[in-house]
Amino acid sequence: MRTPPSWLVIEPCTDADLGVIKTGKEAQVNLVQRTGADGDTCQFARKRYLPREVKSKGELEALGVQRASTFVNDVQYREGRQFRKSRDRRAIERMSTYGKRLLQDRWTGHEYEIMTRLWNAGLNVPFPIAYSDDVFDLEYIGDDTQAAPQLQSARLSRLELENAFDQLVAGLRLLVAEGLAHGDLSAYNLLWWEGQLVFIDFPQAVDIAENLAGLDFVHRDVVNVCTWFQRKGLEIDAEEVFADLLGFL
């Protein structure tokens, strides 16, 4: 596990948006440069969750995003995440404006909590810095010339592919040992940087014990990523990997 960034807090400070790193179905990630009063600077990634309601181009621009969320059918991921107040539960069931706001807040906080837990457990994830409302700040993986590429677009040698797969299995074992399923794992939600596989995007992560479909999510994650490695020429058996993971529950 990497050492946490030393620049976690620079006060007072100003932030400058350096542009979009990537846009996914539920969030947009921008590169931000933070400058302290003494002139010291650092860069980090700012993940902004896309609005769930369709908005006009002007409204989206005002929010600093390019489009609305295209993530649908998230009810299967929410199973096991409880809203204590009956008013909140009713709002979620009706999907009122207030209910959608609750879901947005829970989505953000959930990812921060999961990534903090996994960082502490030793999984190779970007360090989670802080979150508020629909924004999540986390460690930037990359350098001054480029952000770390998604695994699906990284150019790996045969030896690097084998190394990446070994890191994948080790990471999945750790995830399952923590009682969690990523829930949407693919070569698009893994980064490859300086010989290291980095797991990202955990808003949909589920507790295997609390979610009735928990093991189904684990199996789907395994099949998705193993299929990608198979297409790259590795001879692996997704069912064997899944069976191995069950021993870490």
Image (spheres, helix red, strand yellow):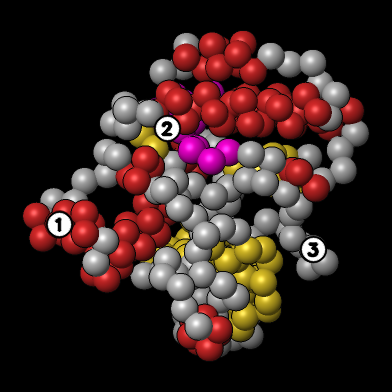
Magenta stretch, residue numbers: 173-185
Please provide percent x and percent y for residue 101: 30, 67
User: Mark 3 belongs to which amino acid?
Assistant: Gln
User: Mark 1 belongs to which amino acid?
Assistant: Arg
Vertical arrangement, residue 58 with respect to residue 99, above or below: below
Residue ID for mark 1: 90
* N-terminal label among 1 and 2: 1
Residue ID for mark 2: 180
* N-terminal label among 3 and 1: 1
The residue that appears at 83% across and 29% down in the rendered structure is: 232
**Alpha carbon distance from label 3 to label 1:** 45 Å
**Alpha carbon distance from label 1 to label 2:** 27 Å
178 part of magenta stretch: yes
Position of 88 compared to 7: left or right? left
User: Mark 2 belongs to which amino acid?
Assistant: Leu
Q: In the rendered view of the protein, which quadrant contains the C terminus?
A: top left
Residue ID for mark 3: 146
Res 34 → quadrant: bottom right
